[in-house]
Image (cartoon, grey):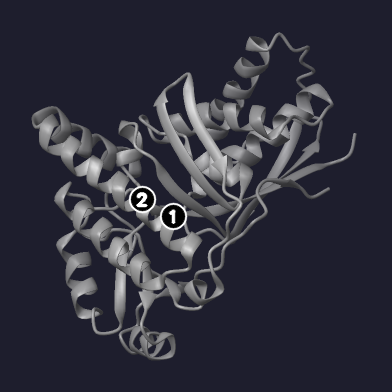
Amino acid sequence: MKSIQYSAPAKVIISGEHAVVYGKPALVCAINKRLSIKFTPAKKTIYIDDIFPKLERFVLDFLKLKKEKINKIEYSYSVESSIPMGRGLGSSAAYCACISAGLLELFTGREWSKEEINMCAYKMEKYFHKNSSGVDTSTSVMGGLIYYRKEFEFLKTISSLAIKIPKHFIDSLVLIDTGKPVETTGEMVQSVGALYNKNSKKMEIIFNEIEKATKRIIVSLMKEDLSFFIDNIKENQDLLGQIGVVSEKTKILLNDLKTYGVGKITGGGGKIDSSGYILFLCKNKDECIRQLEKKSISYLQFLPSYTGLIKEL
């Protein structure tokens, strides 16, 4: 049997993080950073880390649930990634997507549909982020722009939008790295959950406003209205600040950069120190980048990827 290799993209949440856990929609875009895993049949399985055997178990349980005949052959594997880890760009989701696709094929001798791979990857992702909505794995598997809403475990809307982000939007966007948050995404989700349990009415009002911002951002993309997009990015960031997922350090950075554009955190965020990556729209991209480099602030170009999970060998 030959080696099997899959790769999957990172993602950026354009709008709807945290609110998506409470049944509200999120707009997410895959980007051009990818993670790949190569599986090679071997005499003995050698695990690189302690987590992998636990993730393998999710695949085996998934196959048993499907009443699939399992041929659990031994293997070795290698991982390559250009996705920054722990920064809210979905590195764990891409990891889960590639493991699911690779091991499902390795143990059954056939390729699986993206829908089934996503189901398995979502179960894994909940190992990393206990109350995961499933939006990260869905975007990593499907690619492109995803409109995602989970009202119940059995009722999810996962729509690949036919629209693309307009070129003049892309030409103005960068991803600014505030640093790796102290908290994990799971801990940030739990933190928001604690606020929700304390004052559900207030949090529902905020989540409803985030939903409105998400839908208005979709309209702005369809109409190619950059001004409307900017207004709702600002609104989204203000609302995320109200639910306590943006650190003072990150707020200060955004304030320092307001001369050069507007931005919002993307992903789980962080409140103690750093908040991961910021999706930032520059008024003048060249000048904005000069300032970032002057301040020694790391950044990435924002480049959407309309290719999701792919088999590479």
Residue sitting at x 34%, y 31%: 23
In the image shown, does 297 or 206 lie closer to the viewer?
206
At label 2, the amino acid type is Thr
Where, by quadrant of the figure, is residue 258 drawn? bottom left
Q: Which mark is residue 236?
A: none
Residue sitting at x 33%, y 48%: 268
Residue sitting at x 25%, y 34%: 190
Q: Looking at the picture, does residue 313 appear above or below residue 137?
A: below
Element assignment for label 2? helix
At label 1, the amino acid type is Ile
Q: Looking at the picture, does residue 221 appear above or below residue 110?
A: below
The spot of residue 204 in percent (x, y) is 19, 35
Q: Identify the residue position indicated by label 1 in the image.
A: 218
Q: Identify the residue position indicated by label 2 in the image.
A: 214
Q: Is residue 98 left or right of residue 196?
A: right
Q: Assess whether mark 1 and mark 2 are in contact (beta carbons under 8 angstroms).
A: yes
Residue 230 showing in the rendered view: yes
Numbered disc total: 2
Residue 81 showing in the rendered view: no
Q: Is residue 134 left or right of residue 310?
A: left
